[in-house]
Image: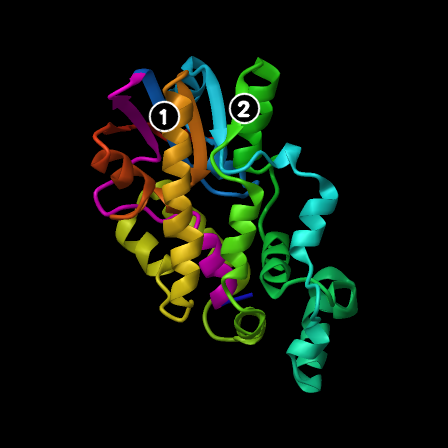
Amino acid sequence: MKKFSFVVLALFISFSLFSQSLLWKITGKKIKNPSYIYGTIHIQDKRAFNFDETVMNAFESSDAFAMEILMDEIPQKEMMDAMLMKNNSLDKLFTKEEYRVLDSVVKAKTGSGILLYNKMKPFFLSSQLMQLEIPKDMDLPLDLFFLTKARKAGKACFGVEKFMHQINAIDAISLEDQAEMLYKGLTDTTGNDDLSKLDEILDTYISFDLEKMFEISADTSLPAEFNQAFLIDRNIVMVKNFIKISKKQSLFCAVGAAHLAGETGVLELLRKKGYTVEPVYFKWIEN
C-alpha cells in the first residue's frame, strides 16, 4: 500500500508548526480545573505507548475522558452498514483488469480474494489493508488503551463527535475517487516498502520532527472537500463539545493528532475562543 494509505495514516499524526508536544493543557474562561488534549495515533506499536509518567499523570488527574467517538458504544450493525456501499460494488467501480489486479493484491495480503470485500467502500478497504502492515505489540490501539483505562477507573467517558460525523466526512469523497486512490495505493511500486514507510511515519510521530510530518501528510491529490470535511469541519465540532464537557469537569481528551494542526486545528480554535493553550512536555522512555 502506498500513497493514499499512508496519507490516511499521516492525517492522524501531523502538527501545527509551533508545537513540540503531543500533550496540551487547556485553561481559562469557565474551565475551573486544567483539562488536557493528547494527540494520538491509531496503532498498536509499543513505541507510541512509551511516554513517561507526565502523560498518565494528566490522564489520572482528570475527572473525565473523551475521545473522538466512543468506539465501544457503536452498535456493530451500524458500524458495518457505514462501511458498506448500498448501490455500488468494487466490481462496478473498476475495470475487469483492474479488478483482477486488485484481487491478486488483496489475496496476497489477506488470504482472501477481493470478492469478500466487494461491497466495502474503498476507503475502508484501504484502511483495513494498511492496518495489516502495522506491528501489533499492544492489545489495543492507543486511543482505545486510554478508553479502557478510563472505564476501569470509573471516569465519565464522552465522544467529542458522533460516529456519523466521521462517516459523512469520508463519504464526502466520491466512491470513484476512493476507488482511484485505492488502486493507485495498491499498485504503486515506487518508493519504500510498506513497513519501512510506516516506520518512517511512527519515527516522525515520536521524534516531533514537524517539517517531516508535514511532508508526509501533504498530498494535494486528495480532494479539497475531503480535507474540509475530514479535518476542518470535524475540528469545529470537537472544540464545541470539548468546551461543553470541560466546563463541567476536568477532561483528558485523546484525538487524532492531525486535529491539533494549523490555523483551523483544535488548538488554534481554542486559542481564538480565548482559552489558554500550553504545551506539556514529556519524554519517551527507552525499553
- List the residue tagged with mark 2: 157
Q: Amino acid type of disc 1?
A: Tyr
Left or right? Give the position of 78 relative to 56.
right
Q: Residue at x 56, y 30 (%)?
A: 145
Q: Residue at x 49, y 65 (%)?
A: 4
Q: Is residue 190 magenta?
A: no
Alpha carbon separation for disc pair 1 and 2: 14 Å
Badge 2 local density, few (<14 within 10 Å), some, or many (20+)? some
Left or right? Give the position of 245 relative to 89.
left
Q: Vertically, is 75 above or below 14?
A: above
Q: Quadrant of residue 77?
A: top right
- List the residue tagged with mark 1: 36
Q: State the SS at label 2.
A: strand
Q: State the SS at label 1.
A: strand
What's drawn in magenta, residue-wise? 3-31
Q: Residue at x 63, y 55 (%)?
A: 128
